[in-house]
Amino acid sequence: MGHNSHEALKYELEIGWLRGMTIPMLSVEAVSHSYGARRALDKVTFDVAPATFAVLLGLNGAGKSTLFALITRLYGTQGGRIRIFDYDVEHASQEALRILGIVFQSRTLDLDLSVIQNLMYHAALHGIRKRDAQTLADEALSRIALSERKHDKVRNLSGGQMRRVEIARALLHRPRLLVLDEPTVGLDINSRADILRHVRQLISEHGIGVLWATHLIDEVADSDHVIVLHQGQVLADGAVSRITGNCGVTNIRDAFTQLTRGDHSIGETG
Amino acid sequence: MNTSVGNRKKVVPVADRRSGFSPQQFAICLKGIVWRESLRFLHQRERFISALVRPLVWLLIFAAGFRQVLGVSIIPPYQTYILYAEYITPGLIAMIQLFNGMQSSLSMVYDREMGNMRTLLVSPFPRWYLLCSKLVAGTAVSLLQVYAFLLIARFWNVEPPATGYLLVLPALVLSGLMLGALGMLISSVVKQLENFAGVMNFVIFPMFFASSALYPLWQVRESSPLLYYVCQFNPFTHAVELIRFALYAQVNWLSLGVVCSCTFLFILGAILAYDPSRGILARRGEAVGAA
């Protein structure tokens, strides 16, 4: 127990230290990726600062999932560089993956295992001792208000609850950057709002950086950092007010429509 | 000089927690993967039953039917005339492991389509270690099945010497790793779940039938020299022979060598195939979901 509170304190100190600093939590520099002749990403560049909710906004096929596969090192980078905090995903992947929490678009929980078993498996994959893992898992479950479902099979949870478990799992090893690929797909309105609120709360409480990929414009709040990705290219990157200001419109929806209205040279994906 | 600014990027908080893993943590990771595979296996009761029924059908029905047709003379490692059921037991053990290897390859294709595989692949441990742990886990599950089968076979008068049960263990570990690694290699090539029927037709059946599992190779040689050579080059034959000899407390050195080399090659191939920069996954743009 003593060990854990010590670890928790270290974590809090670390996060406090992170808040006051300027190194981006995620830095994507001129990243390009092709599948054969098809160019999925073209010199994509942006940063996510600590304690920021960054929305990666793009339609289906914009290249969001490819970018996620590169950030999580499912694929090797073909061109450009991705760093998580100070670690290059390519050359220091171990350190980079260690401080990264991931929620994939598809469901990745073992349906036949219980909630706690899923969390313990994740902890083992991060080399966390059983005793520590149990404490962390209990904490994580109480945070998402699912403590009493601990021993239930995941199969018996609702879609929204599964998502919450996935988020709890992604945060179990106390990452500094949380990336979520369309986490609200297939959820009802209440669950969606619930999950958004939960993740935003995490930022204000723990100061982690969040990259939230979505095609749903109504998930963007005025205080967010938005990156508009369209056909593999970044069309806009900045605070909502700046993007709308640059486009000369009043809301992000209009800005997005204007930006992605396929004219100019964006469409050369071939 | 303001060194604090210059050094800022280098400062890593709680550095001890962030850099590298201790051997103990490697052990935790391996244990977690084996634990999860075993849990999954135990939860899928039908899988356990079908893994047992398959070889038992061969043993109880096929072997009984062919007892009179196929005479097995005294060949090493046997010291006396044996029943056909006893002859095919090692082949059926290897079949259990072959199916288990292919089944975990099937579940890897499934996991990759569904995304479960990613949970494993985004672990910060080195990828070769994760894949090897998964192999160990799959082999452990196959051992459970094999010993359950051997227990039932004992009631059917398949009674290898008591020491055989213990001595066969290292052979089973090796053959389990080899067939698991082969499955893993295949899983990286098979694009979709539907193609698994192809794996049955082109991998499992040829491997099983063109081997010494059901008939001694000297009999094969008499009927077709070509087939004999095919069987000789089939790694599955050597898995079967390694198990057969070990079960009777002997070592077949040739088979041991072949199984070890094949295990090494298959594992190497699987690691390369799942390597992010070299692997086939990235080139195909697979596993991205809705990309």
Image (cartoon, rainbow, N blue to C red):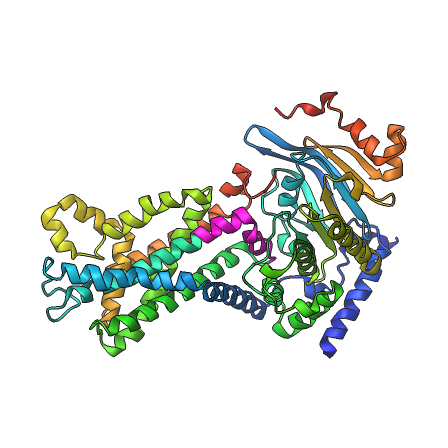
Residue B123 drawn in magenta: yes
In the displayed structure, does residue B240 sit left or right of residue B216?
Answer: right
In the rendered image, the vertical position of residue B261 relative to residue B23, given as above or below: above
Highlighted magenta segment, given as a residue range: B106-124
For this rendering, which residue is in front, A261 or A146?
Answer: A146
The quarter of the picture where residue B239 lies is: bottom left
The image shows residue A168 at horizontal and vertical percentages of: 70, 60
In the displayed structure, does residue A4 sit left or right of residue B103?
Answer: right
For this rendering, which residue is in front, A67 or B44?
Answer: B44
The quarter of the picture where residue A231 lies is: top right
Residue at the image position 9 percent from the left and 50 percent from the top: B222
In the rendered image, the vertical position of residue B22 relative to residue A231, given as above or below: below
Query: Is the C terminus of chain A in the top left, top right, bottom left or bottom right quadrant?
Result: top right
In the rendered image, the vertical position of residue B193 relative to residue B19, given as above or below: above
The image shows residue A52 at horizontal and vertical percentages of: 82, 50
| Residue A215, visible in the rendered structure | yes
In the rendered image, the vertical position of residue A140 relative to residue B118, given as above or below: below
Residue at the image position 13 percent from the left and 46 percent from the top: B225
Q: Main secondary structure of the magenta part?
A: helix
For this rendering, which residue is in front, B2 or A125?
Answer: A125
Query: Is the N terminus of chain A in the top left, top right, bottom left or bottom right quadrant?
Result: bottom right
The image shows residue B64 at horizontal and vertical percentages of: 17, 63
